Image: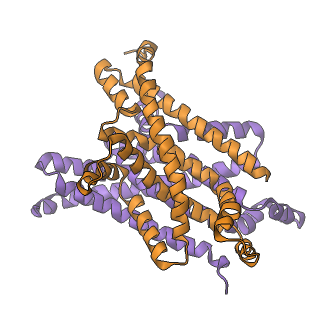
Chain colours: A orange, B purple
Amino acid sequence: MNFSFDVIWHNLPYLLAAARWTLLISVAGMAISIIWGVFLCAARISKNPLLSNLAALYISFFRGVPLLVQLLMAYYMLPYVGLDLPAIAAAILAVGLCSAAYTAEILRGALQAIPAGQTEAAHALGIPAFSLWKRILVPQAVRIGLPSLVNELILLVKVSSLASVVGIGELTRISQNITGQTYRPLEIYIAAAAIYFLINLVISGLGRLAEKRLQAG
Amino acid sequence: MELDLFVRYGPALIRGFGVTILCWAAGSLGGLVLGFVIACLYRWSIAPVRWVIYAYVEVIRGTPFMIQLFILYYGGPYIGLVLSPVQAGILSFIVYGSPYFSEIFRSGFNAVPKGQVEAARCVGMAEATILRRIVLPQMLVPITPPLTNFFIILTKETAILSVVTVPELLYETQTMAAETFTYVEPFLVLSLFYWLMVIGTNWLGGRVEARVTRHLKRA
């Protein structure tokens, strides 16, 4: 069986259409991951023991339970508590909430690298906590943690393939379907891998760009 | 729940867990070392080497692990690289993990202020001494949590090795499920084993973190 570019060419429109779902899940998941991750990290390092223990519990649950299980829980178990989400919302939520746990840990590591003197100076100057975070801590933590964050976002794009289990026709699911029709696994999966690769190339490119800009400061 | 199932399949499951631990430990530690070497090369070498490293990182990081594993295991024999499933599993784990680790190390290098390294050079410290005495102790602080993150991600990634018939935990569990037509028990045990690994890794990460942040604690 020879490698046939025709197979890829014929099925490319379907793959690209499916990649739109992958993109949607990834981008929305990233937004949740980063925003929720910042709050989670703030809770994790807060002086309030209740908050910090709750955050630690959240992180150990979402990192310890496989994402596949979390997805199935979000889709099949939430309706029992009266929260009937459409599949795509459940997928985005599960991916984002899980990734936020990792993001929070990355930010926590980065925050530890910022000298404590800066926080103390800010307190001495009477800078309110919100401004301290917004203007002093988060910008520096993002700079230090950026390569690890990009790692995490790239992993997020790849785990979006799990959304196929709640019935979303994203890239991996559609590749499986096309393979089932054409019996050409090699070509289709290589094409799918190339699409994932391109998406990730854009993310890491943006990451490098952001890194350059932040480094200048 | 039938407990005698576990008497019968217990040894196989534990053997599978052993293989999972072996592949995970060897693969992720190998990836850690390779990632560190890559990050150091990136830091201290000339532009063409950097481009090669950049391309390596982007390609390996950007493609799914399963496809890399397939290419190594099924494509390897075409270029004379015949590997047993476990060898292929460990090798692909090392390759897959290394770019992520190297990026984490790179972020660590960047977190140490340049002025310190320049000052150390000015007082005549050797590059290796600067790395060991100045850069490493400080960079380990921000990168320990992301390193723990990635070790945890890799524990769950070992399940993919079952597709090239590595007799690891998922493989043994699926065998058990298929032979006994039970699904709840085997997969409960499976999650228990993975959870144990994650708890262990998390604990170890916490210990390492306590060790590397020791100098930050006020006396």
* Res. A12 image quadrant: top left
Left or right, residue B92 beside residue A42: left
**Residue occupying the point 79% across, 60% down:** B127
**Residue occupying the point 53% across, 46% down:** A153
Q: Percent x, y for residue A123?
A: 71, 76
Left or right, residue A49 beside residue A183: right
Q: Percent x, y for residue B167?
A: 30, 48
Left or right, residue B209 beside residue A72: right
Quadrant where the C terminus of chain B lies?
A: bottom right
Number of numbered tags placed on the structure image: 0
Q: Percent x, y for residue A63?
A: 42, 59
Residue farthest to the right, as pictured: B122
Would residue B19 be visible to someone looking at this image?
Answer: yes
Residue farthest to the bottom, as pictured: B219
Residue farthest to the top, as pictured: A6
Quadrant where the N terminus of chain B lies?
A: bottom left
Q: Percent x, y for residue B6?
A: 16, 61
